[in-house]
Amino acid sequence: MNLRDQAEQDLSIVLEDDVHGFGWPTTLIDPDGNTADLIGQSGDIGLTIDPDTGQAVTGRLAHIALRISSINDSVLTGLPRGVADNTGKPWKIRFNDINGNVFNYIVHEAMVDRSLGIVTCIIEFIKV
């Protein structure tokens, strides 16, 4: 087995371990409304850096990284992708914060790493 194959298999521990690692239960919803319960690594921080000034500013930056093979093994149609305008149906993501509060997001941007088998999504908080 070559190193890329081994690295992708190791994602089940590195990315999806929700017992001893940083994996976190997540629901991914495709534009057709199909859902898959997955484990990924997510973050939702309330501080960003202004690229013009380099100063810390209040803002919301949320992301999630998911294993492509787990998405492919689910009932979902394809990989998450961002929708450039509000006329299309977006991919949605739902997960709880550390205190059990449920948050809903849409995929703003999806960066697919086919070398390793990860899709990292920049997500935007939505109220439902």
Image (spheres, rainbow, N blue to C red):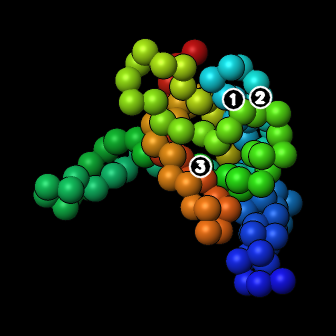
Q: Determine whether label 2 and label 1 are within 8 Å by CB.
A: yes
In this rendering, the answer to whether 29 lies above or below 69 is: above
Provide the residue designation for mark 2.
35
Say which label, 3 or 2, has the lower sequence index: 2
Residue displayed at 33% across by 52% down: 48
Provide the residue designation for mark 3.
64
Disc 1 and disc 3: Cα gap in Å?
A: 13 Å
In this rendering, the answer to whether 61 lies above or below 105 is: below
Q: Nearer the viewer, residue 26 or 90?
A: 90
Q: Residue furthest left?
A: 53
Say which label, 2 or 1, has the lower sequence index: 1
Q: Nearer the viewer, residue 87 or 92?
A: 87
Q: Amino acid at mark 3?
A: Ile
Residue displayed at 79% across by 50% down: 70
Provide the residue designation for mark 1.
29
Residue 11: give x, y in percent of width and height. Answer: 76, 67
Relative to 126, 102 lies left or right:
right
